[in-house]
Amino acid sequence: MDRVNTNIKELEEIIVLLKNQLAVDKKTVETLEANQYWLTFLDSRGNGVWDWNAITDEVIYSKGWKSMLGYEDVEIKNSFNEWEQLIHPEDKVSVTLSLKRYGRIKFGL
């Protein structure tokens, strides 16, 4: 009987952990949906929009932003590395210094 009670307790703890993770995931999805709404709204008005999460290095570039640079939507992936590749060689040092100053240099420019 003790083993059954132990298993029940472990399952209850797992359920609590899963509920907490679901709450975090739900908040993340809500935030992403809100960001996507604004990006879509601004992009539909011809604005070039991008969003960079400097902690996770996740980046979103709008179609308008890509178009302003002369690219089709499929030509630039939504990654920090894509932007990094677009930096003019003469600007790499100043960009690196600026990002270091703000503590966002986790990449090798």
Image (cartoon, helix red, strand yellow):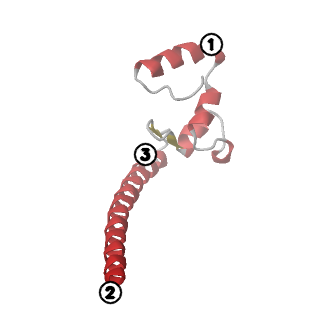
- Give the percent coordinates (x, y) of residue 98: 46, 18
Residue at numbered disc 2: 1
What is the three-letter code of the residue carrying label 3? Leu
Q: Secondary structure at mark 1?
A: helix
- Which of the labelled discs sits on residue 66, or is there none? none
In front of the other: 58 or 70: 58
Q: Earlier in the sequence, mark 3 or mark 1?
A: 3
Mark 2 → mark 3, Cα distance in angstroms:
61 Å
Which image quarter: residue 27? bottom left
Labels 2 and 3: the sequence-earlier one? 2
Answer yes or no: do the residues labelled 2 and 1 have beta carbons within 8 Å?
A: no
Residue 4, position as x, y percentages in the image: 35, 83
Asked if the residue under mark 3 is in contact with the one under mark 2, i.e. CB atoms within 8 Å, the reply is no
Q: Residues within 10 Å of mark 2 (few under 14, many from 20)?
A: few
Residue at left offset 38%, top offset 55%: 28
In this view, the residue in front, 8 or 22, is: 8
Tell me the element at label 3. helix
In this orientation, which residue lies closer to the viewer: 71 or 96? Answer: 96
Residue that carries the numbered disc 3 in the rendered image: 42
For label 1, the crowd category at 10 Å Cα-Cα, with few meaning under 14, some 14 to 19 and many 20 or more, is: few
Q: Residue at x 40, y 59 (%)?
A: 29
Distance Cα–Cα, label 2 vs label 1: 72 Å
Circle 1 sits on which residue? 90
Q: Is residue 104 left or right of residue 5?
A: right
**Camera-nearest label, 2 or 3:** 2
* Image spot of residue 1 (x, y percent): 32, 86
Amino acid of disc 1: Glu
| Helix, strand or loop status at disc 2 | loop
> Residue farthest to the front?
2
